[in-house]
Amino acid sequence: MLRTRYLIASLIVLLLLVPNTAYAMHIMEGFLPAKWCLLWAALSAPFIIWGFFSIKKIVSEKPELKMLLGLVCAFAFVLSALKIPSVTGSCSHPTGVGLGAILFGPATMSVLGSIVLLFQALLLAHGGITTLGANIFSMAVVGPFVAYGVYLIINKSGGPKWLAVFSAAALGNLLTYVTTSFQLAFAFPDVTGGIMVSLVKFLGIFAVTQLPLAISEGLLTVLIYNLLTAH
Amino acid sequence: MLHLDRYAYNNSLVHIHPLERFLFSGVTLITSLILNCEVVSLLVILLMAWVTVHKGSLPFRFYFKLMLLPMTFLLVGIIAIAVNIVQETSTLLWGVNLFSMTIGINYDSLYTAVNLFLRALAAVSCLYFLSLTTPLTEIISVLRRFKCPELLLDLMSLTYRFIFVLLETAEKIYTSQSARLGYASLRKGYQSTGSLATSLFVRTYKRSLDLYNTLEARCYNGKLEVLEQDYEVSKKNIFMILFIQVLLVFIALFYGGII
Amino acid sequence: MSASILQVQGLHYTYPDGTLALRGLSTDIARGKKIALLGANGAGKSTFLLHLIGILKPFSGKILLHGEEVKYNRKALHNLRSKVGFVFQDPDTQLFSASVWQEVSFGPINLGLSKEEVKARVIKALDDTGITSLKDKPTHFLSYGQKKLVSIADILAMEPEVLIFDEPTASLDPRYTKHVMELLDQLNQSNITIIMATHCVDIAYGWADWVLVMKEGIITKEGTPEEIFTNDQLLISTNLSRPFLLEVFQELSSNNYLPRNISLPKKMADFKKILQENAPKNK
Amino acid sequence: MSASILQVQGLHYTYPDGTLALRGLSTDIARGKKIALLGANGAGKSTFLLHLIGILKPFSGKILLHGEEVKYNRKALHNLRSKVGFVFQDPDTQLFSASVWQEVSFGPINLGLSKEEVKARVIKALDDTGITSLKDKPTHFLSYGQKKLVSIADILAMEPEVLIFDEPTASLDPRYTKHVMELLDQLNQSNITIIMATHCVDIAYGWADWVLVMKEGIITKEGTPEEIFTNDQLLISTNLSRPFLLEVFQELSSNNYLPRNISLPKKMADFKKILQENAPKNK
């Protein structure tokens, strides 16, 4: 029993010391078997196509928005490279998923998020090309749509603005990682316990680091949102 | 911070057609992923390291450090996969009892973990070859050959260019905030980061309007069309790429006991 | 009026936020001149220049290119912008591509030229600005001065008849300032009309052969540099200082160091020559 | 050495990309001086200045504040930055708050002062820079010159002992240039040591009482403006031009317009006085 506690404790310490946890949460290149790569890519495709056509429509109406969207992509990339002080004391990187979804809508965000993920893979070696589909699904599909949905629900039900923004960003962030855990659990079920046990393993590992990060991102997004509306 | 980008322009493979570099990386990546064989993975890791470091004249130390970058994810991931609930305690290599269950590593789970470890590193080394030898502008031009929609390519070109502009701006704002003690405590750090992001966003918006004007001044017609550089496709290189793939398939079959 | 390449008649413009920027600005841009546009921050210089390439559309008034009124449809604007080039102040907003070669090719491609012609133009523009060696470099590795030269090559490759520069030497170090000013002279010698907005009266005085002074949304005065910079009342009312060379020269003249009938020197070298020719014989 | 406020000893610094920026830079910053820092682009001026506020940490070498070595922990940096202020070149990168008032209060709040004290400091800083009337304006509404003044007020509100300016007059029109230079003199008179990096030799010559010349990562020479700017060999090797005033003055002296024993004029007014006093009697 002592050994177990020691093991779990050291695992937690290890995870708290791990830098760049937000990046580490992109599924790395080569980690998923080929069939899962294809499946997640196929599941992401409709959202990207939807987003692509909605962007195409926007740009044909207002051509200057193409520049804006390109620059916003660059902005999201830079934002994700910012270190934000995390509640736990270590540093993390915001995903910007919630903010983007609130400002530009989830469909547009799925295309922009995909480009950001591609650039992170190629320029920063975070994430990968074969795992791009899976990462897009969690970070550029589930994240923005959850964030946007939460934002709309709280807004419509007359909740305070800050709560809507906070919940959107925090849940957008958190659900992204829950999705990643699902993706890993599907691909690597526990030999005897199956997918559920595997899911508990991955969720357990990432919850330790991810909960405080989700709260950090929520707080930061409220701050940015307030400042933006002040401008 | 973008060291990969720096090397993408300063390596000895820049004169080779980007399409060849793209294919070498991409096809080998797919082959090794599909074959899913430890020996192939190991060979791909060595091959890519040799081509990137030796042929591309990149510092080995840098390449080695880069290979360590995904280790956090990889180690955490494979530990989670290697450690299972074990019923058949006879195959157990290491384990502990917890709540009347045995949790541990057995031969099968260890094999899966090692296989995954090598496969992931092989794939990563293919990706690194592309990142370290091929600037994004060239990757975009290869995507153009593959008929990727122009709108996406335009967005990617703009993103790539302005990442550097905005990074520089962000760095300057950060510096001026630090000079005024903006990160002196956690709370101040939050507020400073928030105003940094906001200010950067407002500036991003303004920049996009200015950029549109400067493009309009150059007869912009909705398409960001530019002249691509000319390269020669080398048949020999294409043949070599295919040959390597065939070789890898044979090795996988041989190792799997089929040949 | 065949000497005028651009005629500007009674431009009025108000920004969406209500700022009144131009209040009936008129002037003629003569072909082949080197024109300096002076005026304090906020006098409306940039607004005026953006009208010259049809980025802004005046509320009233009009612009004539080669005597023909500029219409604000796509074809007419295309024609205007193929004749009038604009080098923006901050190269970082102008350069949109990460590759120098691609960047410079953008303008000529939009002109609808053939691939060979575009290539030839890019090569020439890089050569004229002296940055051929940068053609394979990514934009983000360049120094500020180098980016400035790329932003000039951008426009040169379109072979315009008129070139507009907004503060071309701002934030450049002395070496690049010299390079850019020499380039401007060279371009002018190859028959390009140049309009340069600047804060630096010394540069304007030494370089220009015609000076436009803006104040509160109109060209309050135009003339040769000698006329403009010896008009003390104008300089005071528009917050301009006198060029250094002129200041010293006039002080020397009025204190009898030099005879009165010497024409004003425009460059340091001229001034030195005058001093040597008129040096007192005895100690 | 109590006259030195900052001592810099053998700084070495290499950027992460491998660019060698400082190669053993040493100098002393004397209290109460007006110091100009000159050097071509790429000489390492900005890198050096960023070391003075501890934004960059040298690979070897050290900086002493009031004779005590600066450590790179949170507390020591806090102390350093509360004593040494830095006004960046481009006010657009320095201003990030929505209103001028918030902007200027950022520094004093971070110093941990009481609310009343912060308020008093902001009011004083706005007053000193002459922009009290802008206090409720949003920063993005201001003209470039006004933003520059706000960026100075930003730092003044922290009441530093040393003030560093990076190209304070770049892109300013003559009126704001004059305003800023007068402000710098005023601040110096209230006993603040000022370090100004500039490309403009004319401004450096007329304003500074000590000049540092950087080349390839070290201070290659320092001295009074007179010493530095009459050293032709130094000027050539560091790509600096001679100040206009000095150039003309020396030309006049060598051509016998003026007697040889007159001390060099530093400002236009001095020069005019010399000319008037030595004017030839006859025509």
Image (cartoon, coloured by chain):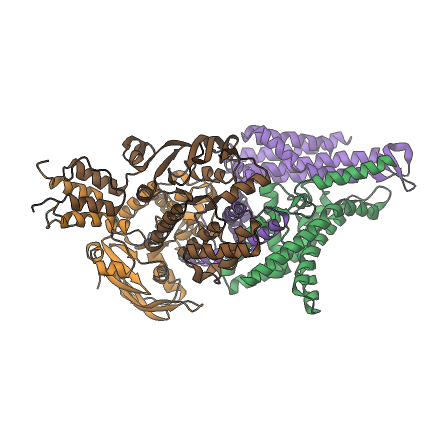
Chain colours: A green, B purple, C orange, D brown
Q: Which is nearer the eye, B161 or C42?
A: C42
| Furthest residue toward right | B100
Could you tell me how many numbered marks the image carries? 0
- In this view, the residue farthest toward the left is D282
Q: Which residue lies furthest to the bottom in this view?
A: C60
Among the 4 quarters of the image, the one containing residue A91: top right
Residue D6 in view (yes/no): yes
Please state if D159 lies on the left or on the right of A19 as rendered. Answer: left
List x then y, in percent, for residue C97: 47, 48
Of B136 and C178, nearer the camera is C178
Residue at 51% x, 64% y: name it: A62
* Quarter occupied by residue C132: top left
- C267 relative to D25, above or below: below
Q: In which quarter of the image is the N terminus of chain D?
A: top left
Left/right placement of residue A11 relative to residue D254 reads: right
In front: B102, or D101? D101
Left or right position of B111 against A149: right
Q: Position of residue C211 (x, y in %)?
A: 25, 57
Q: Answer with the quarter of the image where residue D5 lies.
A: top left
Extreme front residue here?
Answer: D2
Q: In this view, does D60 lie above or below C7?
A: above
Q: Which residue corresponds to the image point at 57% horizontal and 30% vertical from the top-left? A: B53
Task: Please say whether residue A104 is visible from this viewpoint.
Answer: no
Please say if B109 is above or below D91: above
Task: Name the residue: 69% across, 69% down.
Answer: A158
In percent of width and height, residue A5 lies at 84, 38
Q: Residue at x 73, y 38 (%)?
A: A14
